[in-house]
Image (cartoon, rainbow, N blue to C red):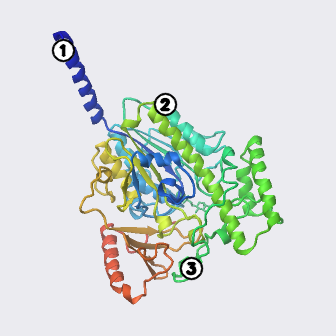
Amino acid sequence: MMRSMDRRTFLGGLLGVAATASAAQRRPPNILLVFSDDHAFQAISAYGRGLNHTPNIDRIGREGMRFDNCLVTNSICAPSRAVVLTGKYSHLNGLLDNRQTFNGAQQTMPKLLQSAGYQTAIIGKWHLKSDPTGFDHWEVLPGQGNYYNPDFLTPAGKHRREGYVTDLITDLSLDWLRNGRDPAKPFLLMCQHKAPHRNWMPAPEKLELYSDVKLPEPPTLFDDYEHRASPAHQQEMEIGRHMTPMADLKIVPPAGAADSPDYQHYLGEYNRMNPEQKRMWDASYRPRNEAFVKANPQGKDLVRWKYQRFMQDYLRCIASVDDSVGRVLRHLDAADLAGNTIVIYASDQGFYLGEHGWFDKRWMYEESIRTPLLVRWPGVAAPGSVSAKMTANLDFPETFLEAAGVPVPSGMQGRSLVPLLRGQTPADWRKSFYYHYYEKAEHHVARHYGVRTDRYTLIHYYESNEWELFDRQKDAQQMRSVYTDAGYATVVAELKTELARLRKELKVPDKDPDVP
Ligand code: SGN
Ligand code: CA
């Protein structure tokens, strides 16, 4: 039998525990966004195309929710980042393409979290030209950044760090979590990788990964773009025709090309390396390049060889990103932060891994418009859950704000994913999604907008006034536009009505805003 004093202590202890638990529940969650650049969902094992193994990224989905239909509003780097900051489409946040400068004076999600008491930090790829605003701490790559011994920008200026970019961004993020963080405040940390962006330069210790592996080719590697409108014929993003021998494929130097812009690009990256990094790099590529020159593949065999070289390098870069995620997750465990931290893994857009013969992104077609999204939120998102609902990068800010208990300002155009994370689907969840791409520079992809539903993709190339319609239920690879098929006339009419409705609702101007 418990003596009264013991009982009081015991009850007091219990009350204390209860008080601590409810205080913990009331404390807004930390938000850790790991955002990579050009990471195709096809190259994450949780999404299962069988290309590679990403155990650490997969862990986020296994312990949380995997989103299978996360889309981007404008499939290119800087515009996607501006959407994630503002919750607004490009025509309203002002950043339509990679060449413009982000107006950092506007309202952003980090600013709103910061004024609600969050400590905010961004480390790694930024790409918005103006200095970051709304962050208590920032250390970012200038422009696209470099893979080896990259420069970083801080409020104090530019400095160079020795090492491989993915490892450095991870080290800096962990250092901030250990030493920069104010434990009295919840945090927003945006850990943003350069990898696996072009020109796909692997870390020294990953150079031999996949060397003996023949990676599976996509069935559409030799697409001839028949049954598509003219833009698909005019693009410049084919593995066969548009990858560069040196910077992209690391065949150095092919006879007679040593003073080309491609070689200068290659050298610019290579010459950042220290002697040991160069030694490891050369030891890996030289013998493989000699074998290539000897085999001298031609025609389709040459495309196949390029596909293998590209994919090996791309997946090697991802292996480092996956290691990084592992280090960060282990730190959250060790620091007892995992329980109250939302961990999000996503990329700025999708990427072609040889589908349609392509690399890069930009299109409204699936591999480009879809981006990976995995979210772990202990106690909220059921472990191993999957959502097939149409979600978007546009939804990230509202999700973070709702999770933090911060009111969502009017003007944001996405939706909070918190109900989906809780396993509920609001009856009025979006059934159609508006897409708009503007940049017509590198890779020569025509401007287009369109509407995507669970089954159809309707695209308008408005400068040449051409349309495409894909029935993805019958044509998952999007090889045949059925826009002019009589059987789809009603579908076309309905989708055009929906497209007009979305353009009005989202305040899309009839004429594109001027891009300098
Ligand atoms: C670079 C790449 C392009 C890529 C853009 C935009 N060329 O210019 O292939 O499409 O970035 O990418 S490179 O030869 O310089 O690597 S984005 O992800 O930043 O939008
Ligand atoms: Ca990108």
Q: CA distance from mark 3 to mark 1?
A: 78 Å
Percent across and percent down for residue 113 are 35, 43
Q: Earlier in the sequence, mark 1 or mark 2?
A: 1
Quarter of the picture holding the N terminus:
top left
Determine if residue 513 is in view: no
Asked whether, in this view, residue 412 is left or right of residue 137, the answer is left
Identify the residue at image location x=66%, y=53%. Answer: 210
Which residue is under mark 1?
A: 8
Q: Earlier in the sequence, mark 3 or mark 2?
A: 2
Mark 1 is surrounded, within 10 Å at the Cα level, by few (under 14), some (14 to 19) or many (20 or more) other residues, namely few
Identify the residue at image location x=75%, y=73%. Answer: 298
Residue 505, placed above or below residue 381: below
Which residue is under mark 2?
A: 178
Identify the residue at image location x=33%, y=75%. Answer: 500
Percent across and percent down for residue 321 are 56, 47
Say what secondary structure mark 1 lies in.
helix
Q: Which mark is drawn over residue 225?
A: 3
Say what secondary structure mark 2 lies in.
helix
Determine if residue 303 is in view: yes
Quarter of the image holding residue 387?
A: bottom left
Q: Which mark is drawn over residue 372?
A: none
Q: Count how many numbered circles sit on residues in the image.
A: 3
Q: Earlier in the sequence, mark 3 or mark 1?
A: 1
Say what secondary structure mark 3 lies in.
loop
Q: CA distance from mark 3 to mark 2?
A: 52 Å
Residue sitting at the far left: 4
Mark 2 is surrounded, within 10 Å at the Cα level, by few (under 14), some (14 to 19) or many (20 or more) other residues, namely few
Q: Amino acid at mark 1?
A: Arg
Q: CA distance from mark 1 to mark 2?
A: 38 Å
Q: Nearer the viewer, mark 1 or mark 2?
A: 1
Residue toward you, 62 or 69? 62
